[in-house]
């Protein structure tokens, strides 16, 4: 999993690429730590190149959503592939995390 973070227009943009599973979840958690520390988070996550997420990946997205919510911020995941969105739908994460 590759995570690229940029800022602009008052937002933080994150682009995900690849598979998120147990082999790289720890590194992904370290890479996304700056997103959890933002003062007034307004995060847009581009998932167009995210191929897969395991339950560990879901846990990390939930942690990020909780951190953003605690700071009255906004987080949206965009351009999710149907097979990845299905995982979010089946697990109920689509009701917790805003997906466009």
Image (cartoon, helix red, strand yellow):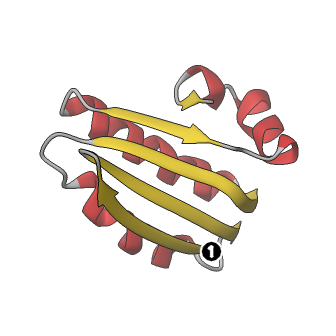
Q: Residue at x 72, y 44 (%)?
A: 80
Q: Where is residue 78 in the image (x, y as percent from the top left)?
A: 61, 41
Q: Where is residue 72 in the image (x, y as percent from the top left)?
A: 21, 26
Give the image quarter of residue 2: bottom right
Towards the viewer: 26 or 2: 2
Q: Is residue 95 above or below residue 4?
A: above
Towards the viewer: 85 or 56: 85
Q: What element carries label 1?
A: loop
Q: Can residue 66 be seen in this view?
A: yes
Q: Position of residue 26 (x, y in %)?
A: 48, 74
For residue 62, side relative to residue 24 (left or right): left
For residue 62, side relative to residue 8 (left or right): right
For residue 91, side relative to residue 61 (left or right): right
Q: Residue at x 49, y 36 (%)?
A: 76
Q: Is residue 35 above or below residue 85?
A: below
Q: Is residue 25 above or below residue 35?
A: below
Give the image quarter of residue 23: bottom right
Q: How crowded is mark 1: few (under 14 residues within 10 Å), some or many (20 or more)?
A: some
Residue farthest along the front direction in this orientation: 9
Q: Position of residue 49 (x, y in %)?
A: 72, 63
Give the image quarter of residue 20: bottom right
Q: Mark 1 points at which residue?
A: 1
For residue 91, side relative to residue 98 (left or right): right
Image mark count: 1
Q: Is residue 30 above or below residue 33?
A: below
Quarter containing the C terminus:
top right
Residue farthest along the top direction in this orientation: 95
Quarter containing the N terminus:
bottom right
Q: Can residue 21 be seen in this view?
A: no
């Amino acid at each position: 999993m590759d995570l690229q973070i940029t800022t602009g227009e008052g937002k933080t943009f994150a682009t995900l690429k690849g598979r998120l599973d147990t082999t790289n979840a720890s590194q992904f958690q370290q890479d996304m730590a700056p997103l959890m520390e933002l003062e007034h988070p307004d995060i847009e996550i581009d998932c167009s190149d995210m191929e897969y997420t395991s339950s560990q990946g879901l846990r990390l997205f939930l942690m990020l959503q909780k951190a953003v919510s605690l700071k009255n911020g906004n987080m949206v995941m965009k351009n999710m592939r149907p097979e990845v969105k299905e995982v979010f739908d089946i697990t109920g994460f689509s009701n917790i995390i805003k997906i466009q």
